[in-house]
Image (tube, rainbow, N blue to C red):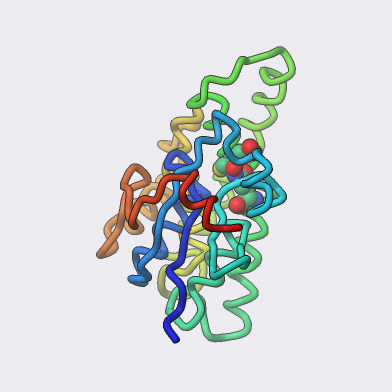
Amino acid sequence: MTAPMLRLYDNLSSGNGYKCRWLLTQVGLPFERVEVDIDKAESRTPEFLAVNPNGRIPVLRLGPHDFLAESNAILRWIAEGTGFWPDNRRDKAAVLQWLFWEQYSHEPNIATARFWKTHRFEMTPERVHALVLKREQGHFALAQMETHLALRDWLVGERCTIADIALYAYTHVAEEGGFDLDRYPAVRRWLDRFAAQPGHIAITDRPGTEVPLAEALATEG
Ligand SMILES: N[C@@H](CCC(=O)N[C@@H](CS)C(=O)NCC(=O)O)C(=O)O
């Protein structure tokens, strides 16, 4: 029996979605891509909440009624049996360390600052105050990457792993959120190294076969 076609619920502006489209493309897995307009709350409808009760993209549909959410869990699933997931115990743990760190210390600061700017959020006094803290904590995260990458080419081991993919997604667009990357030359070299890999796709590329949201959700039943 052939496996069902993978389907990625996604949004082009999302770095979390980009992680998944980047790796699916790299490993050559065919997939359908469903654009979800998060600005119009399309991820918050009852139909979408049946796909992901958390109301967020990305979600990878693995089969009928089988949905995997959380970008870094999706990366882990795709990477099984490939060189993007290391084969030794210590490096596996190091990759997980970066993935958890990305979600707790990097993405909430760097991605959110970019999201508020590029999605034209109203800058209420609360957001202005929060942005100051996000800038400070985002720079703290970038400085940790700078120290680490000054001594090595990749975050873990001798090649690109899902740790690099997870961190590349929002670091390479950090300037859209007001972070000056000139302060981090080793991070800049790592970004260039990442983008020079064969088969690299940009965050603006649209890989996969596009399926309209209404059509996709109608088949989820
Ligand atoms: N921890 C989640 C975060 C997912 C997330 O925040 N998704 C955003 C786009 S990047 C979203 O769907 N926002 C729409 C909403 O919250 O309604 C992951 O890594 O996948």
Residue 71 x/y as whole percent: 57, 57
Q: In the image, what residue occupies the spot 62% across and 58% down?
A: 69
Question: Quarter holding the C terminus?
Answer: bottom right
Q: Position of residue 48 (x, y in %)?
A: 62, 46
Looking at the picture, tell me which residue is in the foreground, 177 or 10: 10
Q: Quadrant of residue 101?
A: bottom right
Where is residue 5 drawn, in percent x and y?
43, 69
Q: Is residue 36 above or below residue 92?
A: above
Q: Quadrant of ligand 1?
A: top right
Q: Position of residue 181 (x, y in %)?
A: 44, 37
Q: In this rendering, is residue 109 above or below 123?
A: below
Q: Residue at x 42, y 75 (%)?
A: 158
Vertical placement of residue 96 versus 19, above or below: below
Task: Please identify the residue farthest to the top as the structure is shown.
Answer: 125
Q: Is residue 152 left or right of residue 40?
A: left
Q: Nearer the viewer, residue 186 or 156?
A: 156
Residue 208 is left or right of residue 88, and the answer is left
**Camera sees residue 10:** yes
The residue shown at (57%, 77%) is: 91
Is residue 122 positioned above or below 25 on the image? above
Q: Is residue 203 left or right of residue 58?
A: left
Taking the spot 71% from the left edge, 25% from the top edge, the residue there is: 130
Examine the rendering and report whether any part of residue 109 can be seen.
Answer: no
